[in-house]
Amino acid sequence: MPTRELVQGILGKIESVTAKVGVIGLGYVGLPFAVEKGKVGFRVLGFDRSAHRVDLVNQGKNFIGDVDDEELRSLVADGFITATTDMDRLGDMDVLIIAVPTPLTKNLNPDLQYIEAVTRDIAKRLRPGQLISLESTTYPGTTDEVMKPILEQSGLKAGVDFFLAHSPERVDPGNRRYTTKNTNKVVGASDPASREVAVALYRKTILNVVPVSSAAAAEMTKVFENTFRAVNIALVNELTLLCDRMGLNVWEVLDAAFTKPFGIMPFYPGPGVGGHCIPLDPHYLEWKAREFNFNTRFIALAGEINRRMPEFVADKTMRLLSDQGKGLRGSKVFVLGVAYKKDIDDPRESPSTEVLHLLAQRGAVITYHDPHIPHFTEHGHDLRSVPLTAEALNRADLVLILTDHTAVDYALVAKESVQILDTRNALKRVDGPKPNVVLL
């Protein structure tokens, strides 16, 4: 157990908002977190290996959609947020929040290289009384089994000399209702002192904090949340494949089903799953389960179904062109939307990238429009968004809606397109008959 003096020291700094807060990784999670801490008076130092990103922050220039431009400018101007590439300054911080990527390898195994590298950086400079909290999504056991041994190579002990916790990020890019501040925050640590300190920190800026008994419980909570979504999306995607065979409108079926006031929750199909969580997190849990000789068959099947959707969309595109008497090779396909979800500028793990790649491989001539992503590079394809005009729609043999951005003029799309494959039911908002529209 740590001395009460050590615990009271960090708690006093947190309560008086004098604790120096370091945020490692200034991306979709780290920068919004830094802004929330800065808004209540903490002095926040952001760490990032990208000198370009650090320079932007220090100039008060925002690059994350969920951060308010003026809030960031004001916090930087007033000295509440600064950024650096200098990892030697980690030792100056009272609190260190880790928000680095946790990708998968090509074999769908966890890739913890960024967490491990940052943890080694901290271990070299670790001092008594610091709180380290991991926010990156990962498999249950990462905080205690991977981070803790590395940090304790410093000679200091977790829960005795320093505090170690896990509080998984719950960021939903583009969500204007639920932000960092008003989204319930799960906080777990494997010793009482670390949990007490971490809960105190998060309660300074987040309306409702939910403590759990261990870091592993917090890690499991996050991967379950996203696995829940992945499995339910897979269910409606599989229903979509069946309805396609049966000649039924899956959107009509789902809209009718969701009128039931109990026992059901709305999920909708699409060209696949994207973003930083749903395509990745279930595989973290699947991988960890093997350590316990446990086969997560349900989760594996959901991933398999969701990964089939881009191929299905490409095949359906080819079928629709064939119905026009055209082959896919040489046909002009105009794609609307390459972001992984509507109204954001984030293409990470977007199913659009795989659909575009499959169509291009088969010889289609691809152009795209996305009001949020002007330039797009993936799978060796380097494309720029073209204006959405009647001429651009007229020239296309098929218009393929992959992301249903609100800013798109869907009335124009419906009026000027020869044929449309709508994978998001975006044209539902356009009144009148639409004989040129085929739904997923």
Image (cartoon, helix red, strand yellow):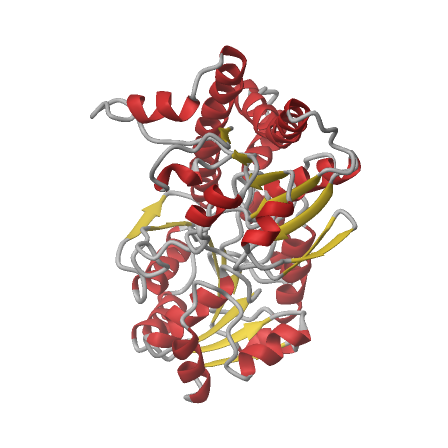
Name the spot of residue 58 as percent of width and height, x first. 55, 82
What is the number of callouts on the image? 0
In the depicted structure, whether residue 214 falls above or below residue 233 = below
As drawn, is 343 to the left or to the right of 300?
left
Pick the residue in front: 52 or 270.
270
Residue drawn at x 32%, y 66% is 205
Instruction: Locate residue 24: give its quadrant.
Output: bottom right
Name the spot of residue 432 as percent of width and height, x first. 35, 36
In the depicted structure, whether residue 45 falls above or below residue 355 = below
Residue drawn at x 60%, y 34% is 283
As drawn, is 354 to the left or to the right of 272?
right
Residue drawn at x 53%, y 59% is 372
- Residue 177 seen in the current view: yes
Pick the residue in front: 194 or 333.
333
- Residue 280 seen in the current view: no
In the depicted structure, whether residue 410 falls above or below residue 25 = above
Name the spot of residue 268 as percent of width and height, x first. 42, 32
Q: In which quarter of the image is the N terminus?
A: bottom left
Name the spot of residue 168 as percent of width and height, x first. 45, 50
Instruction: Locate residue 32: give its quadrant.
Output: bottom left
- Extreme left residue here? 261
- Extreme bottom residue here? 78
- Extreme top residue here? 246
As drawn, is 95 to the left or to the right of 206?
right
